[in-house]
Amino acid sequence: MRFSALYFAGMLPAARDCDAILCSTFVDVAALRAVGPAWLREVPVFTYFHENQFAYPVQVDHERDLHFAVTNLTTACCSDQVAFNSRYNMESFFKGCIEMEKKIPDMKLNVTGELRLKSVVLHPGVDFSRLDETPTITDVDGRSPVIIWNHRWEYDKNPDLFFRTLFQLDDLRVDYKLVILGQSFEQRPEIFNKTRERLGHRLLHVGYVPEREKYYQWLRLGTLVVSTANHEFYGMAVIEAVRAGCRPLLPNRLSYPELFPDDYLYDNEDLLYRLRDGLKEKRLDNGTARKLTEQFSWPALAGSYTDWLNT
């Protein structure tokens, strides 16, 4: 975010050869237009916010670097059109802008109202074609239900709540198996090591799966996909799992309420009971899975992107 504008400005040709510029929020648009070729001040710039630095989680709040949030704000101001991947992302961004404006009372910026006028919500379109071609694992009588975790192995996904709830299910002798997917890093929450020790008898798979087809096969095996995230601006991994037939169980907050009906949402204090009851339910049939996810497919959303870029 600090240097991408300088990097891209050096790559752009001196003469204009495009109709528009499309940026992500990792690009400081104000700096890009300032240091880049003169024609950058003439072509429209469209910026897509896949996250925002006002609501992006940090382990300790005093560690937050407001410079990145200011960059998001000036980027939005210097873009001709702005899109957010979810309403939650957009509203948390505007909330952050308003709170920042209050911290500088000697300067009445009041830019939020103007930004709203050029902002829209555009969910990222998902290509389900290869997932739809992956065969569904045929249910076998007596097979244990399978819980899917397919999130990054980081603190902001709140793995402690998830796995400690599974420990409770294990103590209650509730029947289930567990598949742990998602990317892990050198430093990761200790709860993952404890889970290997505590739930080894329930684990079917642990670890990142780089091959897309194999990853989809694990999703096709799942009964439930669960999120306990403290941070989620969208939720593409969950959407893919639902498309594969996993019944979602998601926090009643963040982006999830705008993506799925209330029946699939829970409050933290109810997670144990909702998980226990959810394991008694079957996987989603193909019709229900498609009904819940088709609105997030690229064919369903492509027209909205065309309209946005033609604004």
Image (spheres, helix red, strand yellow):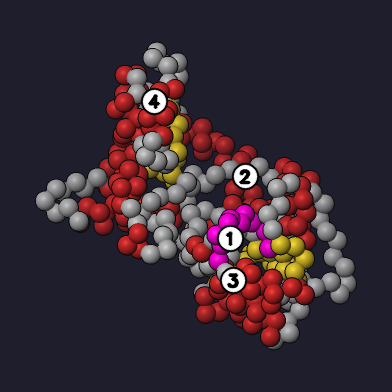
Which callout, 1 or 2, points at the residue further toward the start of the chain? 2
- What residue do we see at 55% from left, 59% from top? 187
| Badge 4 or badge 1: first in the primary sequence | 4
Check disc 1 and give the amino acid type: Trp
Kind of element beneath mark 3 = helix
Dot 2: within a 10 Å radius of its alpha carbon, few (fewer than 14), some, or many (20 or more) residues? some
From the top left corner, tell me how far across and down residue 35 is, in percent: 31, 26
Disc 3 crowd rating (10 Å Cα; few below 14, some 14-19, many 20+) is: some
Q: Dot 2 corresponds to which residue?
A: 126
Residue at mark 3:
191
Foreground: disc 3 or disc 4: 3
Q: In what element is the residue under mark 1?
A: loop
Mark 4 lies on residue:
9
Whether the magenta-drawn stretch holds residue 184 is answered as: yes
The segment highlighted magenta reads: 180-189
Contact, CB < 8 Å: mark 3 with mark 2? no
| Residue carrying label 1 | 153
| Distance between mark 1 and mark 2 Cα atoms | 23 Å
Q: Amino acid at mark 2?
A: Val
Q: Is residue 184 visible?
A: yes
Give me the C-alpha separation between circle 3 and circle 4. 44 Å
Tell me the CA gap for discs 2 and 4.
30 Å
Q: Earlier in the sequence, mark 2 or mark 4?
A: 4
Q: CA distance from mark 4 to mark 1?
A: 35 Å
